[in-house]
Image: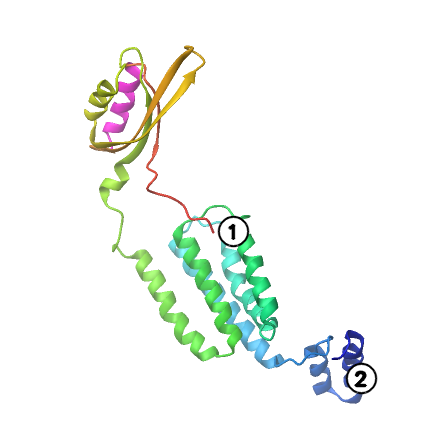
Amino acid sequence: METPCTGLSGAFSAVKEGGRNKMTEFFMHNVYGMESNISITGLFFSLTLAFILGGALANIYYHLEPEVTKGFSITLALFSPMICVIMLLLSRNSGSGIAAIGAFALLRYKSAPGTAKELLALLISIGIGIACSTGFLLATIILAIPVFLLFFLLSRSEIWNTKEKNSLSRRITVEPSQRMETREMLEGLIGNYVEKYTLVETKYDYNKTTEKKAVRYTYEITLKGKETEGTLIDALIENRILFTLGASEGKRQVRL
């Protein structure tokens, strides 16, 4: 096995012996003396296609989500060529490839939660980069075009849209007051403004203000209409009930 110095000296000697072809060999020569099957032409076409498809994906996502951040758009555009380069460099070393996969796995703990659509866009970008690194560029284009079309059309279509009732779903946490001491009284009040409610959590705590043990009930509720939300809030305030009202936990984000 050649040492790093031997491989590097061999690269310089290759430049001295010939013209432009030898210069090309120098840039593609591995300084550790290992054989490489990557050519300048193949690398150029693979990276060019990865840049084009990555930019197209970023543009498509921008039209689907106009409020997307600039950073995420840049990530989509450059993720494919970076994956392509990494896969090309690790194509002959399975051990390094496994190490790279572990490094990518660590990124999820440094990223903010994102939506399922963002996760899908990143997976498409990774797929483009890996496909470009294989060298089958025509097959990559043939596969990428229908994926882009489906991604765009399904995102814009009305199929699988969230139902109207889901937009009326809320999660509310209430604490009984002197006027509403029991759970039955609370549910009777809430039931006047919601279509249905489900108790999901009961939590006992110590209230430092009143110096008494407090109980908090958490409900998943579906409002009768958008206008009833304000009415429900007014009723809770009128009865001096401590409450926290927020979006339903059904709409969760995905950790990338």
Q: Which residue is mark 2?
A: 13
Task: Say whether disc 1 or disc 2 marks the residue closer to the N-terminus.
Answer: 2
Q: Quadrant of residue 101?
A: bottom right
Q: Amino acid at mark 1?
A: Arg
Q: Position of residue 164 (x, y in %)?
A: 23, 42
The reply to whether the magenta stretch includes residue 235 is yes
Q: Which mark is residue 189?
A: none
Q: Nearer the viewer, residue 40 or 112?
A: 112
Q: Position of residue 155 (x, y in %)?
A: 33, 57
Residue 137 is left or right of residue 204, and the answer is right
Q: Quadrant of residue 25?
A: bottom right
Highlighted range, magenta? 226-238
> At x 41% / y 45%, what residue is drawn?
253
Within-10-Å neighbours for mark 1: few <14, some 14–19, many 20+: few
Whole-angstrom CA distance, mark 1 to mark 2, is 45 Å
Count of all numbered marks drawn on residues in the image: 2
The reply to whether the magenta stretch includes residue 45 is no
Residue 41 is left or right of residue 66, and the answer is right
> At x 35% / y 70%, what residue is drawn?
146
Q: Which residue is mark 1?
A: 108
Q: Amino acid at mark 2?
A: Ser
Q: Nearer the viewer, residue 192 or 182?
A: 182
Residue 43 is left or right of residue 146, and the answer is right
Instruction: Give the position of the N terminus as an image quadrant.
Output: bottom right
Please tell me whether mark 1 or mark 2 is closer to you in this view: 1
> At x 41% / y 49%, what residue is drawn?
115
For label 1, the SS is loop
Label the magenta part by its dominant secondary structure.
helix
Q: Position of residue 249 (x, y in %)?
A: 35, 39
